[in-house]
Image (spheres, helix red, strand yellow):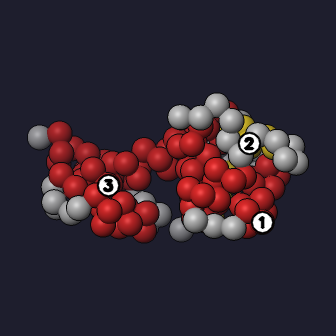
Amino acid sequence: MMVTGDNISISNALADYLEAVYEISKTKTNVRITDIALRLGISKPSVNRAVNTLKKQGLVIHEPYGDIILTERGREMGESVYTRHCMIKKFLVNVLRLGETEAEREACGIEHNISQNTVERMKKYMEK
């Protein structure tokens, strides 16, 4: 599945990087390659390659050895992926009563393979 937004499609793997940058930027002013590598449990060279791809697509601004900054489009897409992830995890914890760790792991897998319609229905179900 591809994540799309504003005429841009990115792979699920790149969406995970974008989500990580968005999530880290919520609590830290400066997002670095090391921060993303630690968050995702991935090597720094792998993160660097992904960030360069996101940069080419206009989703992040990054100078070598510098901070990673989301562009407006990057922030919107990162926020969208993050919001879906949180909604799915909340459903798994609150409705299905999964533990936090298991729900987190499951949400990571589900978020890329579920339609927006299903996510909206999950949200409506929890609002009842």
Q: Residue furthest right?
A: 64
- Decide if residue 18 is in sight here: no
Marks 1 and 3: which is nearer the front? 1
Mark 2 residue element: strand
Above or below, 106 against 95 in this view is below
Q: Is residue 12 left or right of residue 47?
A: left
Q: Which residue is mark 2?
A: 68
Q: CA distance from mark 1 to mark 3?
A: 29 Å
Q: Quadrant of the N terminus?
A: bottom right
For the residue carrying disc 3, how many other residues have a C-alpha within 10 Å: few (<14), some (14-19), or many (20+)? Answer: many
Which label's residue is closer to the chain start, 1 or 3?
A: 1
Q: How far across and how far down the image is residue 72, in percent?
A: 67, 33
Query: Residue 45 has which mark?
Result: 1
Q: Kindly state the secondary structure of the residue where label 1 is placed.
A: helix
Q: Residue at x 84, y 47 (%)?
A: 65
**Label 2 or label 1, whichever comes before in sequence order:** 1
Q: Does 111 appear above or below 83?
A: below
Query: Decide: marks 2, 1 in contact (CB < 8 A)?
Result: no
Label 2 is placed on what type of residue? Answer: Ile
Q: Position of residue 66 (x, y in %)?
A: 82, 42
Residue at x-position 76% and y-position 40%: 67
Mark 2 burial class by Cα count in 10 Å: few <14, some 14-19, many 20+: many
Residue occupying image coordinates x 86% and y 43%: 63
> Viewer-nearest of labels 2 and 3?
2
Q: Which mark is residue 33?
A: none
The amino acid type of the residue labelled 3 equals Lys
Residue 116: x and y in percent read: 39, 53
* Three-letter code for the amino acid on which mark 1 is drawn: Pro
The residue that mark 3 highlights is: 89
User: Which quarter of the rendering shows the C terminus?
Assistant: top left
How many residues crowd mark 1 within 10 Å: few (<14), some (14–19), many (20+)? few
